[in-house]
Amino acid sequence: TSVPEAEELRERALASLTTARARTTLLTSCVEDPDLTAQHSPLMSPLVWDLAHIGNQEEQWLLRAVGGREAMRPEIDGLYDAFEHPRAERPSLPLLPPAEARGYAAEVRGRVVDLLTAADFHGSRLTEAGFAFGMIAQHEQQHDETMLITHQLRTGPPALTAPDPEPVPLFPGPAEVLVPGGPFTMGTSTEPWALDNERPAHPVDVAPFWIDTTPVTNAAYQAFIDDGGYETERWWTPEGWAHVRQHSLTAPLFWRRDGGQWLRRRFGVTEAVPADEPVLHVCWYEADAYARWAGRRLPTEAEWEKAARHDPVSGRSTRYPWGDADPGPEHANLGQRHLRPAPAGSYPAGASPLGVRQLIGDVWEWTSSDFQPYPGFRAFPYKEYSEVFFGPAYKVLRGGSFAVDPVACRGTFRNWDHPIRRQIFSGFRTARSEAL
Ligand code: AVJ
Ligand code: FE
């Protein structure tokens, strides 16, 4: 490594870790300690668990695996192992109290910063191009999104505020575009901080299809509700129908009907459901049923990525819909700058070459695909990040939400969850096959 290159990697690693920690600090200092140790939903950990888990993962990977240091507090590893204790169980564990959890995470970080000054970015596959540091920055940001979900589930007065996205001119359309058929490169072998499940790059042949130019809006989704969508069995898969019946689902999570209108609770504030915003907090079953009602379907994961990355002029797959430049505020609603998605049709500068908007940011988009490894997949650096989740129990989500930081967002980035999940910042867009 030349000196300037190593210096650049060091700065990028430090900046990414610092940005993540500022967000973690915000999310764990905007409420009083009892709100950190309480469980706001059985689906979520107490916030104080995420905080110490962030520190513990950083200690295990950066101080121990990269730095070769001894464990600081080996007795706590088990408490913060996500596989040892399901979320519902975590409040009853002898967790570090808030002040200790903060102190532990800060102590780990201080030692990581020391280690970074002498880091060798070509020492091993783990440190190549600063991968381990990037992985840990992404891990912290992913838990920050998880903590933001916990904040949304928490009841009581608002703890967080952020400016709303700028109002935008009405999106002129078209409502859908045709993505030409043919092969494209899916996944990556060159993006230095891409995680194991995004690798390797491989060709995928995709038949021509049409895809929505924006995510499905609340207004469009409300038309499905008003048309009796939740009461009509034929729009649902058998599992989806059983699920909506059993749980009496009638609308997205956090929606409530008040006389003639729909209201929703959003980070402690109740508001009228905004018509032009992408629908949020729907599960895969709801997204799939809506698409069938609309005479359409969810895109496959490969279709989504082709729409997001394939440049029809060069034939190359770009890092993002707008090209290879890192995301800026003009491209996408990312990084918790806002506490909501921007209206459908926002961010013209972030559009793909074919004019598909908001593929990155705003809402995670459900795809029709199960979470599966790419051909040639190798678990790295640990099986519990991706490999143990491969299979039909999880559906892939793409594109990232307003709560995703740019460090954890790429055209290749893959998220996954159970098809019943809707506390996550999930929405969708629809597609249809080109009639041949
Ligand atoms: C990729 C978002 C599904 O939160 O369960 C965090 C990320 N993995 N710690 C999750 C993750 C380990 C993961 N998701
Ligand atoms: Fe984790």
Image (spheres, rainbow, N blue to C red):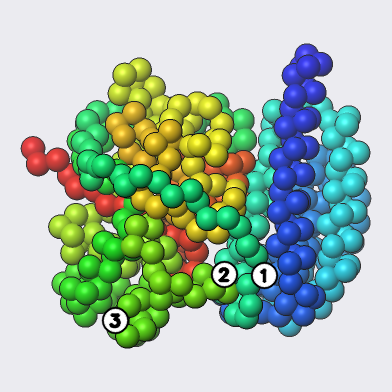
Cα–Cα gap, marks 2 and 1: 8 Å
How many marks are shown on the rendered structure? Answer: 3
Q: Is residue 40 above or below residue 23?
A: below
Circle 2: residue type: Phe
Residue 185: x and y in percent read: 38, 29
Circle 3: residue type: Gly
Which mark, residue 260?
Answer: 3
Cα–Cα gap, marks 3 and 1: 29 Å
> For the point 22% across and 74% down, which residue is it?
226
> For the point 21% across and 36% down, which residue is it?
178
Question: Is 271 positioned to the left or the right of 290 in the image?
Answer: right
Circle 1: residue type: Ala
Mark 3 nearby-residue class (10 Å; few <14, some 14–19, many ≥20): few
Q: Point out the tag, 2 or 3, that comes first from the N-terminus.
A: 3
Question: Is 381 positioned to the left or the right of 323 in the image?
Answer: right
Which mark, residue 159?
Answer: 1
Secondary structure under badge 2? loop
Secondary structure under badge 3? loop
Do the CB atoms of the residues marked 3 and 1 lie less than 8 Å apart?
no
Residue 416: x and y in percent read: 47, 56
Q: Nearer the viewer, mark 3 or mark 1?
A: 3
Direction top: furthest residue? 2
Question: Is 209 positioned to the left or the right of 166 in the image?
Answer: left
Q: Is residue 282 above or below residue 56?
A: below
Do the CB atoms of the residues marked 2 and 1 lie less than 8 Å apart?
yes
Cα–Cα gap, marks 2 and 3: 23 Å
Which mark, residue 267?
Answer: 2
Q: Is residue 268 visible?
A: yes
Secondary structure under badge 1? loop
Direction left: furthest residue? 436
From the viewer's side, name the closer residue of 339 and 72.
339
Quarter holding residue 44: bottom right
